[in-house]
Amino acid sequence: MHRGATGDYRVTAHGGEEVRAFVPKPLPPVPPIQVDGQLLKLLEAANRALGRLDAVSSLLPDKSLLLYSYVRKEAVLSAQIEGTQSSLTDLLQHERGTVSGVPRDDVAEVSCYVAALGHGLKRLRDDNFPLSNRLIREVHGVLLSSGRGSKLTPGEFRRSQNWIGGTRPGNAEFVPPPHTEVENCMASLERFLHPTNDGLADLVRVGLAHVQLETIHPFQDGNGRVGRLLITFLLCHLGLLQDPLLYLSLYLKQNRSEYYRLLTRVRLHGDWEAWIAFFLEGVRVTANSASDTARHLSVMFRQDAARINTLGRPANSTRRVHEALMALTICSIPKVCDSTGLSYPGALAGMERLVELGIAEEIPPEGRSRTFVYRQYLDRLIEGTEPL
């Protein structure tokens, strides 16, 4: 199928030189995407994987535990794609008030991503706010509320030309639309986010919308992170997932070269089908991996709880410490006291029993408080999150 470029070039001036900036055409693509053959098989497999993820996550004794950890894992991975060196352990230690060995701005950026995701989901679900450009700007404002991008007009569409790669627009790998076109481009994208009678499958709509936002690059900074957040918001908004348990950043991190190559092919040649195939495979792989993690954690939590139940009278207080450790992953004894209401000696005794059972492990403290980690839980979560 021949489409050609999915946008037009506008000549604009920047820094005394003429620049050709790319302005994408509105979605959906013309001619329409034909979801048949191999693409249909990929779509069906991705939808089945999402259904399994919804079902498997319900097996957990407390789904919020996995949500808490997965949101933070996604924040770390998404920030790593942008070049930060923060790890999941760094973020968890930061949230516990201890000091990690990475630059403060790196951890702050990851922490802001967690806050931005939480803000967007709360607005969509609790406040019944529409998925709109206003919400996207709000999320961007939270995302850049601290860290390196905090002075780059958080929450506002850009008012100057930006570019990707190179030292200036004249030698850049890609130049997004002039800032004067951003409002119109984003208004068109906003209309596309809401299903009409265009016949597009929901997952295809999500994949198209992600590329369009990346192409518009509407902000001075944080565009990649906002584009990945949009995937999660759309999955929940369209009812493809009940809970935000699917994040593609690990898949995109592992396939960065192919990801950028396909974005370029869409822009230059209109090859939406190749991108959609890549995207659907990413959804399938990521959903299946999340399902495996949920199953693994469900079994692990049950086995650990069964061992605690053999302790006799100390089982009750030890169980409360275990629940705190599940929720926090890394914690000090004062944090356990705050979470459980136990006295310091009671919390410490419970934690030491978890150490004896091989459930908890003491790690070197950053201050006076003794610090413990749910080692098997953390090891499962950090798979793939090593800094690039």
Image: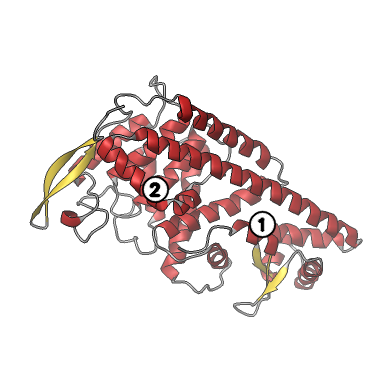
Which residue lies at the image location 76% right of the left edge and 68% below the top edge?
Answer: 351
**Position in image of residue 26 (x %, y %):** 28, 31
Tell me where residue 164 sits by quadrant.
bottom left
Instruction: Say what amino acid the circle numbered 1 marks.
Output: Ala
Tell me where residue 321 sits by quadrant.
bottom right
Tag 2 or tag 1, which sits nearer the N-term? 2
Between 3 and 379, the one lying in front of the other is 3
Between 345 and 269, the one lying in front of the other is 269
Number of marks in the rendered image:
2
Which residue lies at the image location 20% right of the left edge and 40% below the top edge?
Answer: 181
**Position in image of residue 44 (x %, y %):** 54, 29
Describe residue 269's horizontal placement relative to residue 119 as left or right: left
Asked if one can make out residue 127 in the rendered structure from this viewpoint, the answer is: no
Residue farthest toward the left in the current orientation of the protein: 16
Residue farthest toward the right in the current orientation of the protein: 312
Q: Which labelled disc corresponds to residue 258? A: 2
**Position in image of residue 133 (x %, y %):** 34, 39
Q: Which labelled disc corresponds to residue 113? A: none
Q: The N terminus is located in which quarter? A: top left
Q: What is the C-alpha distance between the residues marked 1 and 2?
A: 36 Å
Task: Tell me the crowding category of disc 2: few under 14, some 14 to 19, or many 20 or more residues within 10 angstroms, Cα based.
Answer: few
Asked if one can make out residue 178 in the rendered structure from this viewpoint, the answer is: yes
Instruction: Say what amino acid the circle numbered 2 marks.
Output: Glu
> Looking at the picture, does residue 319 appear above or below residue 183?
below
Describe residue 89's horizontal placement relative to residue 221 as left or right: right
Kindly report which numbered mark, 1 or 2, lies closer to the viewer in this rendering.
Answer: 2
**Circle 1 — which element?**
helix
Residue denoted by label 1? 327
